[in-house]
Amino acid sequence: MKLNKLIYSLPLAIGLVVIGTGCGKDKFNINQNINSPTDSTVTYDVVLPAALHATGTIVANQWGTTQNWMGWWARSGTYAPSVIEESYQITTGFGTGIWNNCYDNNYDYQIIISKAAQAGAGFYEGIARIMKAHNYQMLVDVYGNVPYSQALKGGLNPTPAYDNGVDIYKNLFRELDAAIALIKGAVVNATNPNKNIATNDIVFGGDKGKWIRFANTLKLRLLVHAYAVSGFPIAAEMAIINTEGSGFLGAGENVMVQPGYVTDKPNPFYNNYRATPTGTAPQNSVYYKANEWGIEYYKYNADGRTTRFYEAGANGLVGVAYGLPPITANAAANLAGIGPGLYKTNTAPQAIMIAAESYFLQAEARLRGFLTSGPSVVDLTNQGIQESFTYMGVSGSAASYISGNAGYSDVDAAAVANTPANPAGTQPVGGLFTIISQKWFALNGITPLEVWTDYRRVGYNQVVTSSPINDRFVYGAGVGFDAGPPLSVAPQNTSTKIPVRYLYPQTEYNYNAANVGAQGTVERYSRIFWDIN
């Protein structure tokens, strides 16, 4: 891990939220070392909104590569090729922002946990534990084994050992249990340590029930990811969730960060992909355009979300093949770009998880038999589709989209491909194929890591028993659309598969060599523990 973060930056949320809590900026020394979680110059109530905003920024801005690999976006012809990304020859210097930002953010949450525990501010501590678990889940899903039990100790242990990803997953359940208990037991009044939680909690405004349902939904995400891991305690963990009784994120319960974004301090996704505070187009709004395969798949299904995920360019709703060398016809201005359902407005809240994902997770858990009561797989899937339509700002119901694609298993969860033309075992039926496909349609630009995880953990032979493809999911296959996501067409690309993980950052090899070296040879096709198809 990077040993020292020399500047402790307190982001946008402090300026927008903390003023209202009576804590002035003179309380901060920006030269404090982030690796000093007991530093007396910061307080848990001040750090919380800043840390939550930082998490929202990570979710918004770290996944351009994933967007490209999964077939949603592609480099426009205005830019020269990104050879490392488009040839899949990733290195230890590639994509280090996920590692650095997640650990930096978790240092902030560790400060909150330590300070809030000392003060008896259980609501703050509980939120920080949930968000720390959220970030560690992302780290494991991208890198596999990572520093965990010995991490975030600063100078007390500057070279932390790595924990196995499966052990981290298991421990995250206990972290979330502790968080739920703290939040449930938190007393909030005008004078106690939990005061001002409604202001400083820039996600749910101090709503205990929503935080607990979010924690349970994170648990369900972990269980769904690890469903095939031998000995993983699915039944025991589901029993704990059921006993707790609050359930999962429901209709309209999107996990959104809102510190009070304004024109000169805009929503991070908008700022990165739509317009800067001065109104100019950022580089990423020119670089990232519609992937030809992805936008055509939305149009193939007459999907009402198409013009929300994508915005027409000079040539209309036209995309570009991923990795195509720059040519004038594919200049940025000619291509469809990122759409208004994603960038919304500069003052819109920033998503961390949306309710649609919660319903799709519930649907898969119901299908696999570890969620045993409540709505059916079909009903949960359809509710997830509706939640996506609502979040993206599509007017009306998703019912016409579902009925218009009746019999097509990428939309119709009740589809049965068992006819003389499509004998059983040769084409996907509804159910799992629908759930995984609809997550692809719904989470574009929102939580793409979840879809990359699906692509890696669900072999296509799980939905088509005759398929020899057991190491990845194939979108579009079996419903008359070209199988994908497509590989890069870059002339220098010789790979036939999308990478299944990122490599550890070079800084780990420089400063934590013994512990990262203990992980053995790690390359782009080294599987995460749940990738066992």
Image: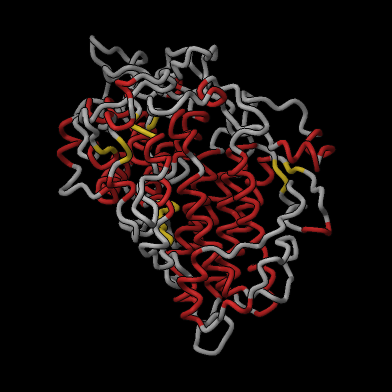
Image side of residue 18 versus residue 44, left or right: left
The residue at the far bottom in this view is 191
Image side of residue 295 versus residue 163, left or right: left
Q: From the viewer's perspective, is residue 471 above or below residue 119?
A: above
Residue 213: x and y in percent read 45, 60
Residue depicted at x 58% and y 65%: 10
Q: Nearer the viewer, residue 186 or 98?
A: 98
Residue depicted at x 71% and y 27%: 522
Q: Quadrant of the C terminus?
A: top right
Q: Is residue 432 visible?
A: no
Residue depicted at x 48% and y 56%: 242
Q: From the viewer's perspective, is residue 459 above or below residue 370?
A: above
Q: From the viewer's perspective, is residue 217 above or below residue 509?
A: below
Where residue 528 sits, quadrant-wise, is: top right
Residue depicted at x 40% and y 57%: 267
Image side of residue 136 versus residue 278, left or right: right
Where residue 104 sits, quadrant-wise, is: bottom right
Residue 384: x and y in percent read 31, 45
Image side of residue 443 versus residue 144, left or right: left
